[in-house]
Each structure stands twice: as C-alpha cells, then as structure tokens.
Image (tube, rainbow, N blue to C red):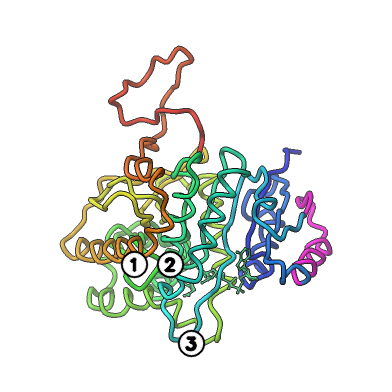
Amino acid sequence: MRRPVRIAVTGAAGAISYSLLFKIAAGEMMGRDQPVILQLIELPDAMESLRGVAMELEDCAYPLLHTITLHDNVEEGFSNCHFALLVGARPRGPGMERSDLIEVNAEIFARQGKALNDFANRDVKVLVTGNPANTNALIASRNAPDLSPSQFTCLTRLDHNRARGMLASQCGVTARDIQNIIIWGNHSPTQYPDLHHATVFGVPAMGQIDTAWYRDQFIPRVQERGSEIIKARGLSSAASAAQAIVDQMHNWSQGTDPGEIVSMGILSDGSYGIQKGVFFSFPVRCNYGRYQIVHGLDISDFSRKQLTATELELLEEKSVVEHLLPKETEASHMNLTICLKSGVTLYADGSGPSAESKFMNNNRVL
Ligand code: NAD
Ligand code: LMR
C-alpha cells in the first residue's frame, strides 16, 4: 500500500462536495491504489452538517479512505495538505453573473492563499472552484509568496466537459470519440469554446459540423450552460462540477493520455499573446505531476477576437480586486520562470540544459 496523500476540501458540507468527497474516497481522483486522508473544512455554523457528511463517508467503508478530519478554519485544515480543493464560496442565484460574486467571495481567497502559504505541503497543488474562479485563483496565488504561482489552477474543466458532451450529442457519437476541445479564458460567458483543433473519431470536427451552428448555437450554449442549469434546477451545477474537479486533478497528478489536450485555468506566462498576470484557461498536457501549455496552435482572426474579449474581462476583474493583490508577489506573477517542459535530465553537478534553454530549471515536480 502507498502512503496516503492529504486532500483538503473547503465548502465540504456544500452541494458540490456532496458528490466530490465520495468520488475522491472511491479512488476516482488519485487512482484506485492511492489511499487518501480527507481534511474537510467548513464555516463554524456548518460543522454539524459536515459531521453528517463525515458519518456517511465512514458508512461507505471505502478501502482507500484512511482518515477524515473536520476543521472550522483553514489554517488548521490546510496543514501539510498535498492537494487543496477550494470549493467553499457563495454560489450565484438566478439573474446573477459569476462576476457579481467578486465582492462577497474575494476575501475568502486572500485568507486561504495566506493559509496555504503558511501551512500546506511545499508542493501542494491547488484547484479553485469557488466563483469567479479565475480571479479567486489569482487572489489566492498572489497571497502565497512562498509557493509558486504554477501550483495554483482554477476550474475550467467543467466547460471543457460540457463542450465535449454537446459536440458528441450533435455528431451522434459518444464523448470518448471526441478529442482536443479547448476552452480559452475566463470561466464566464466570455469564455471561448474552440473546436478548431478538436476531432471526432480522429477527423477534424470543423469539417463535420455547420459553421453557423458552431458560432450561433454551440458557443453561446457552452458559455451560458451554468445559467441554463440554474434556471432549470434553481441551484447551480453540482454533480457535474464535482466530476470536472476530479477530472482536472486526475490529469494534473496522473497525466493526460498521449496526444490528449485538456483545458486548465492557469497563470498566463504570455503564451498566445495573453497578458501575463491573470489566470486564463489554456490547452495543456500533463505528465509527471506537471502541466505544460500546448504551443503552436493556429489562431484564426475569429478566434483571436474571442481570446481578446475574455482576456479583457479578466483584466477588468483583476482591477476590481487590486487591493487584495500584495505588491510583493507582482513580479513572480508577471515573470513565471518555471517553463513547464519535460524530457530534461537534471544533473547533480548543475550541467545539463543551458540557462537560455526553455526547459524546466528546477527539479520540483509541481
Ligand atoms: P454551496 O452553497 O452548496 O456550498 C458552499 C459551501 O461552502 C457551504 O457549505 C458554505 O458553508 C461553505 N463555505 C462558504 N465560505 C467558506 C469558507 N470561507 N471556508 C469554508 N467553507 C466555506 O455551493 P456549491 O454549489 O457547492 O458551490 C460552491 C462554489 O463553487 C460556488 O462559488 C459556485 O459558484 C462555484 N462553482 C464553480 C464551478 C466552476 O466550474 N468553476 C462550477 C460549479 C460551482
Ligand atoms: C457553472 O458553470 O455551472 C458554475 O460556475 C455555477 C454558475 O454560477 O454558473
């Protein structure tokens, strides 16, 4: 048996967690041979409800569930965690945009960034789900001066999965037959679901669908899917969000299939001309516990306009939370030096790739 890994989850008595925790305990996220310790965090008022969730987890008798701990503060709850899933935040209701949540949720992520900095394992991998997810990830990351910004990500896998499911349905195939969807930008209605690199049964998707359907129906439907669900359910998506969290963390820690592209919200390093310093969803591949942006994809004029629109929205959101972004972390977020490429031998004597090479220049597996 492997040593257990510590997974901290905030908002652990909430709707998403009610699906998420059971998936993690069953081994869906970290693998069927990896025991887990769940460090569950809630607001003090929700601790009794959290106790009920913990009882249910116990009652499932999952062989991989090593220990459950319950915490009413993040400082204790993040202690030594290897993975931190920041779910806890207020969800939007009907008629709201996710950006309406900036004011109410932003402070939560400043405190959580500081707590991760002070108490989490040095190689912690963080996924922010609470909305607005991209900007909350920026706040958390900027408040963690001793961690690398590349240890922080935000959830855009739900949008990726939605796009995959909708395209499958349109083409009369299953989701497994669809590859290389890309979600660019913000987890908001400005996101850009890009099918120009997607394939259906290995054949370019754009040759198999009508361009008018793609632009007038598919794109807005993916962009507005969160609202469509809130309207229908009266509540925001929960089970599908939990599945997306599992998928994103599974790929990040266990890798993507050879050639597979997935979408992850990460700090922009300037790739594809996107301004540095904002969390932006990019196409990535993962291996050895790291992610790498997929470079060299063609960007049409149509795509460029979409990328710019979502980039501008993120810059605008950033300006609203400027007071929560400490100056001391500005430089590290504007000059992400760790270029996440693989296939490099790091020699103990320091020889190996030259300083100018674009390869990874430290040996921490992030
Ligand atoms: P919920 O209201 O059912 O649960 C949220 C839980 O978080 C509550 O139990 C609450 O007590 C707890 N909480 C609030 N502040 C906290 C804090 N500071 N520390 C610890 N716990 C705290 O909401 P939900 O449906 O689980 O959604 C959670 C968040 O995820 C919302 O912001 C929602 O908008 C967002 N979301 C994001 C995506 C995405 O794709 N990025 C998808 C779905 C939902
Ligand atoms: C979603 O996309 O379903 C979530 O971000 C919840 C929401 O507010 O739309």
Q: Quadrant of the N terminus?
A: top right
Labels 1 and 2: the sequence-earlier one: 2
Q: Position of residue 52 (x, y in %)?
A: 79, 70
Do labels 1 and 2 touch, CB within 8 Å? yes
Residue at horizontal 18 percent and vertical 59 percent from the top = 300
Answer left or right for 227 relative to 219. Answer: right
Q: Is residue 62 positioned above or below 43 on the image?
A: above
Q: Give me the C-alpha separation between circle 2 and circle 3.
A: 17 Å
Asked if residue 264 shows in the view, the reply is no
Residue for badge 2: 159
Q: Residue furthest left?
A: 301
Residue for badge 1: 191
Labels 2 and 3: the sequence-earlier one: 2
Q: What amino acid is labelled 2 in the image?
A: Asp
Q: Position of residue 244 (x, y in %)?
A: 53, 62
The 10 Å Cα crowd at callout 1, few under 14, some 14 to 19, many 20 or more, is many
Q: Position of residue 37 (x, y in %)?
A: 73, 49
Residue for badge 3: 231
Q: Is residue 229 positioned above or below 148 on the image?
A: below
Where are the magenta residues, as a range?
49-68
Name the element at disc 3.
Answer: helix
Residue at horizontal 30 percent and vertical 66 percent from the top = 313
Q: Give me the C-alpha separation between circle 3 and circle 1.
A: 20 Å
Callout 2: CB less than 8 Å from ligand 1: yes
User: Which quadrant of the picture is home to ligand 1?
Assistant: bottom right
Q: What amino acid is labelled 3 in the image?
A: Lys
Tell whether position 57 is magenta.
Answer: yes
Residue at horizontal 25 percent and vertical 66 percent from the top = 309
Name the element at disc 2.
Answer: helix
Q: Give me the C-alpha separation between circle 1 and circle 2.
A: 9 Å
Q: Is residue 121 positioned above or below 16 on the image?
A: above
